[in-house]
Amino acid sequence: MKNCTRKLYQLFYLMLIFTLSSCTKDPVSSNNPEIFLPFDSSIIVNHNTININLIPDYWINKVRNDLHIAYGHTSHGSQLITGMSGLISFKGNQYRFNGTGADSALELRDNPFSGAYDLGNPNRTSWATATRNYLNNHPEINVVVWSWCGQVSTATNDDINTYLNLMNQLEIDYPDVKFVYMTGHLDGTGLTGNLHLRNEQIRAYCISNKKILYDFADIETYNPDGVYFGDKIPNDNCDYDSDGNGSRDRNWAIEWQNAHPGLWYNCSSAHSQPLNANLKAYAAWWLWARLAGWPGN
């Protein structure tokens, strides 16, 4: 009898501990959504990740073998594509890509989605539905990238939260696909402007939640030597205010191009200078290599 009583007390005690521990857990709800953590740490691609010469050939080849990318964009986002196209002639055929992966090229499907053009066109949510429809019909895709046009400039805090939540839900629903977050291009409003605040919101979320970020705006804020122009109201054309009088009177990309002949290549660069698209291409290949497994060092 004593043994039975002792066992009953032990069982009651274990049940009590389980009940109390369960009560302390935060419920998963619309107010406290599950956060998908794709990596042990975030992957941030920005002006610090433009030295394409650091990427070993092994990982360039692995990118071409392993990645199947779908990329949705409008004009500003095309800088990655035109930059990558020019890179082939500038650096070599190992950087080749096309929409099918033919001839051992990287498979990068340029604007394959239906129903949306970028992250804000025709509205701020259609891209997510377009992504789902495409992935459901093309399960071979393992990387999805969408870029903004100018919509971050007018976005509210809630607008960006909508974007982040939609991306996170896609990661939950398609765990075998890597989704790349992106900031919006510079617009000349400087460090106190809404664009910078909303880009900072995206950056903070990606760092805190171990996401993959292609920091479009940050790449436009530094020249290849690491000189910072963010406090000089720079815009997407790489114009900046050199003397602090509030008027953009110089262009850091043109200045660098003129001072470094042979170290950059001419290519189309929507709304901007060739050097900007060069940097976008270098950063893109750094991103692809990281997604293929390169540790980045």
Image (cartoon, grey):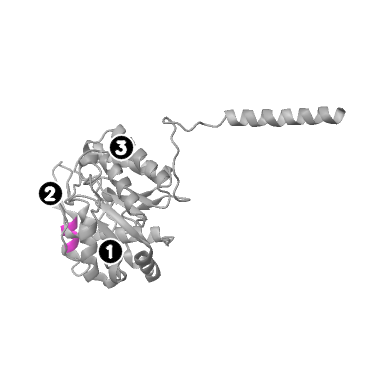
Residue 254 counted in the magenta span? yes
Magenta span: 253-257
Image check: 10 left or right of 3?
left
- Count of marks placed on residues: 3
Q: Which mark is residue 160?
A: 3
Query: Element type at marker 2?
Result: loop
Q: Which mark is residue 100?
A: 1
Q: Which mark's residue is nearer the viewer, 2 or 1?
A: 1
Q: Are marks 1 and 3 in contact (CB under 8 Å)?
A: no
- Please say if 279 is above or below 92: above
**Between residues 15 and 294, which one lies in front from this camera angle?**
15
Kind of residue at disc 2 = Asp
- Quadrant housing residue 280: bottom left
What is the distance, in whole Å, between disc 1 and disc 3 at their CAs? Answer: 33 Å
Question: Of marks 3 and 2, which one's residue comes earlier in the chain?
Answer: 3
What is the distance, in whole Å, between disc 2 and disc 1 at their CAs? Answer: 44 Å
Most distant residue in the front direction = 137
